[in-house]
Amino acid sequence: MPPAIVLSEDPIQPYTSAFEPGEGAEAQFLGVVRGSEDGQPITGIDYSAYLPMAEKMLQDLVDRGRASQGPHRVFIQHRLGFVAAEEPSIVIRVRTRHSAEAFDLCRWYLKEIKTCVPIWKRPVFAPETVSSPA
C-alpha cells in the first residue's frame, strides 16, 4: 500500500497490490459526496483543513490504531478543496489477517476521523433555477 495517509486535492484512484504474508483480508470504505445536503441540492463540498495539524492527527490516529487494534496495514486519503457531487472524498483501506477485523477497523478509523481530525466541509449549494413566465 502507499503511505498511510494522504490529504490532497488529488482524486482518489483505485489501488491494488500483492498481499503481505499473513494478510488474508482487505476492507475498503469509499465515501462519496451526495447530491444534497439537508434536503437541498448541492454541486459538491469544499473541504478544508489546517494541514499541519490534520496530518499530525491522522498520523497519530494510525499509530494509535496500530498499537491498540492489533497488526494491520492502513491507507487513508481524504480530499481537500472542491469535490463534486458523486465523486469520492475519502477512502480507507485496511488489510488484516481476517475479514471481521478489517471491517471493524474501517469503521473505527472512519468514526475517529469524523470526530477527531480537523477537516471541515462547506456544502456548495446548487444555484436555484428560475423559471421564466410562459
Image (spheres, rainbow, N blue to C red):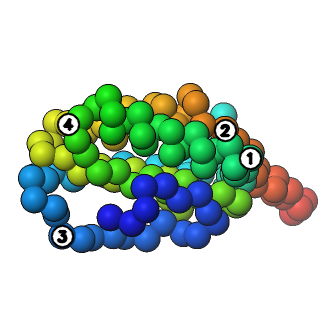
Residue 42 visible to the viewer? no
The spot of residue 114 in percent (x, y) is: 55, 34
- Mark 1 or mark 3, earlier in chain: 3
Residue type of the residue flagged with mark 4: Glu
Q: Nearer the viewer, residue 80 or 23?
A: 23
What label sits on residue 101 in the rendered view?
Answer: 4
The spot of residue 85 in percent (x, y) is: 60, 58
For marks 3 and 2, give the CA distance: 33 Å
Residue 74 visible to the viewer? yes
Residue at the spot 81% in from the left edge and 56% down from the top edge: 127
Q: Which residue is mark 3?
A: 18
- Mark 3 or mark 2, earlier in chain: 3
Q: Which residue is mark 2?
A: 118
Q: Secondary structure at mark 2?
A: loop
For marks 3 and 4, give the CA distance: 19 Å
Query: Residue 64, relative to residue 11: is it above or below?
Result: above
For marks 1 and 4, give the CA distance: 31 Å
The spot of residue 93 in percent (x, y) is: 34, 53
Residue type of the residue flagged with mark 2: Pro
The answer to whether 127 appears left or right of 82 in the picture is: right
For marks 4 and 2, give the CA distance: 26 Å
- Mark 3 or mark 4, earlier in chain: 3
Residue type of the residue flagged with mark 1: Tyr
